[in-house]
Amino acid sequence: YAAHHDSTKHPAANFITNASIRYTAGSISGNGPYRVGLKMNQGWIYTEGLTHFEQADTDRLIMAGHDSQGKLVVALQLSRKPF
């Protein structure tokens, strides 16, 4: 959203926070920054502007988007248990 008003800002969007979800399918697209979509029975969770990821183990994935100054602008964390 910020990029629409100022082209120097990193484009990022995230529409859900601190929620337990169950998704039926997932999709990663883009050439960087990346977009992630998670399909749920009730609709989609969509995260845009992801630039980095960290997979600490097989049950936890952290994805983040950083601006040109290295500041965090968006994050998506997936795991079977809260962390």
Image (tube, grey):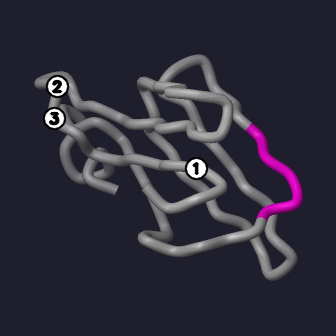
Number of the front mark, 1 or 3: 1
Image mark count = 3
Secondary element under disc 2, as helix, strand or loop, is: loop
Which corner quadrant holds the N terminus?
bottom left
Residue sitting at 70 percent across and 51 percent down? 37
- Residue type beneath disc 1: Leu
Quarter-of-image position of residue 7: top left
Query: Do labels 2 and 3 touch, CB within 8 Å?
Result: yes
Q: Amino acid at mark 2?
A: Gly
Residue at numbered disc 3: 71
From the top left corner, tell me how far across and down residue 74 is, in percent. 35, 47
For marks 1 and 3, the one nearer the N-term is 3
For residue 13, side relative to residue 37 (left or right): left
**Where, by quadrant of the figure, is residue 11 drawn?**
top left
At label 3, counting other C-alpha atoms closer than 10 Å, the crowd grade (few under 14, some 14-19, many 20 or more) is few
Q: Residue furthest top?
A: 31
Q: Nearer the viewer, mark 2 or mark 1?
A: 1
Q: Which residue is mark 2?
A: 70
- In the picture shown, does residue 37 fall above or below 20? above
- Tell me if residue 17 comes above or below residue 48 in the rendering: below
What residue type is disc 3 on? Lys
Tag shown at residue 78: 1
Residue farthest to the bottom, as pictured: 42
Specify whether 55 is left or right of 21.
Answer: left
Q: Residue furthest left?
A: 69
The secondary structure that dominates the magenta segment is strand
* Disc 3 element: loop
> Which range is magenta?
23-27
